[in-house]
Amino acid sequence: MNLKISSEKIQKIFKKSKKKQIAVIGDVMLDKYVYGEVSRISPEAPVQVVDVKSAEYKLGGAANVANNIKTLDAEPVLIGIIGDDIDGDIFLETMRRQNLTTRGIIKDESRPTTSKTRVIAHSQHILRIDSEVKRNIIGKIANDLIKFFKTNLSGFDSVILQDYNKGILTKEVINKIISLCKEAKQKVYVDPKFDNFFEYKGVTVFKPNRKELQDALGVRIDGDDSAADIGKKLFEMMKCEWLVLTRGEKGMMLFDKESGKIVVHNIPTRAIKVADVSGAGDTVISTLAVSMAGGANIREAIILANHAAGYVCEEVGIVPIYKKDLVESVK
C-alpha cells in the first residue's frame, strides 16, 4: 500500500470536509487536572499532602473525539449524558469555550457527570479519582437521546459511536442508531469496548485496539502474522465495510476486500518517539471520519489518521490534532 498522499489532495479533502456535521454519540467525560506541590506527610495518615497551585479542565471520552473533529475544522455534534451537577456545568462551559455546540447534551439528575480527576505534583501523576455511574440509560433519557439523533440525522454527514462502557451505548441504543443510519445511508464509525462489542455488525468502519480485540475474542496477539489472522476472523464476523486495528506503538492494520478476498495493509506508526498513546484512538477515528467526509477513500483516510496518531503520540497527555499540524506532518 502506497503510504503517500499529495498536498493538493489533502487540501481538497479538508476544503470539502470543512463545516461538515459529524455526530459523535457516546460516553462523555470531564478530565480534571489538579497541579500542586508536596512538601510534607499528613499527620492524620501516612499519605502525601498536596498543596494545590492550579487546576485545568479538558473534554474526555466521546467529547475528546468531538474536540478532535473541531480542531480538524469540521463541525461535531456531540450527543451524550451529563449529570445535573457542578462537573456538568464545568463540562458545558468547557465545550462552549472550545466553540462546540451543546445542543446534543442531555442532563440526567439520577447520575453524576462522569469525571476523572488526576492529581499531579512535581510532574508526577500521583493519584486519580473517578466519579461515575455505569448503569445503562433507560426510559425517558434513552428516548430523548434517540429522539434528538433521529430529528437531526438528515443534517449529519456521518456518525461516530464512541463507547467506553459507561452505560450510554446500550444494546437498544446501538441497534436503533445503526438501523436509522442504514435507512438514511449514513456512514457509521465505531470505537468499541468490551461490553456490546459484537453489537456493531455491518457498520462502515469498526476500529478496536489490540487489547479490545484480545479481550473480545479471548485470544493473544503475538506479532504481525497473529494480528492479521485474528483481524481477518473479526472482519468476517463483524461484516463491516472496513476494519481498522490500532496497535499502539506498532501502528495500525487496515482490513479491506478486493475481488472478494480480504487484504491486510500493515501501516507502521509515524511517531518518531512514542511518548504517550493516550487518546490516539480518539484521534484516529476523528481523522478517519473527517477525511472521508472530505471525499477521501479509505486508504487516503488511513494515511491521514496514521499521521495524526503519530503526531499526538509524541506528546504527553491527551492532546487534539490540529489541521495545520496534520498537514505539515504529512508534507
Image (spheres, helix red, strand yellow):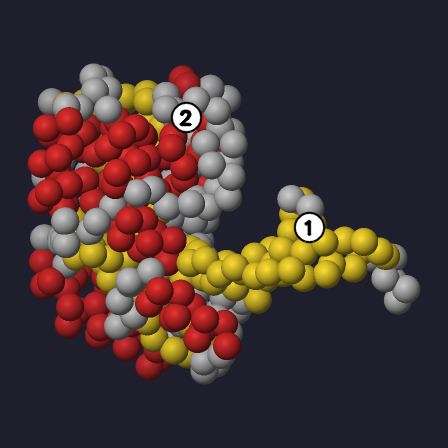
Which corner quadrant of the image does residue 260 belong to? Answer: top left
Task: Give the x, y percent position of residue 219.
Answer: 49, 32
Total label count?
2
Q: Which residue is mark 2?
A: 271
Residue at x 19% of width, y 28% of height: 299
Q: Is residue 159 left or right of residue 37?
A: left
User: Hey, which quadrant is residue 268 in on the image?
Assistant: top left
Name the residue type under label 2. Ala
Near-viewer residue (121 or 295)? 121
Image quadrant containing the C terminus: top left
Q: Secondary structure at mark 2?
A: loop
What residue is drawn where x is 33% and y is 67%? 96
Residue 89 percent across, percent down from the top left: 44, 75
| Disc 1 versus disc 2: nearer the observer | 1
Instruction: From the top left corner, tell me how far across and down residue 59 is, in percent.
Output: 42, 58
In the depicted structure, whether residue 21 falls above or below residue 189:
below
Give percent across and percent down for residue 120: 64, 51
Query: In the depicted view, which residue is nearer to us: 301 or 10?
Result: 10
Residue closest to the eye, 113 or 239: 113
Residue that mark 1 sits on? 121
Q: Marks 1 and 2, Cα distance to the nearest angstrom? A: 28 Å
User: Which quadrant holds residue 300?
Assistant: top left
Kind of residue at disc 1: Ala
Query: For mark 2, does the 10 Å Cα neighbourhood hold few (<14), some (14 to 19), or many (20 or more) residues?
Result: many
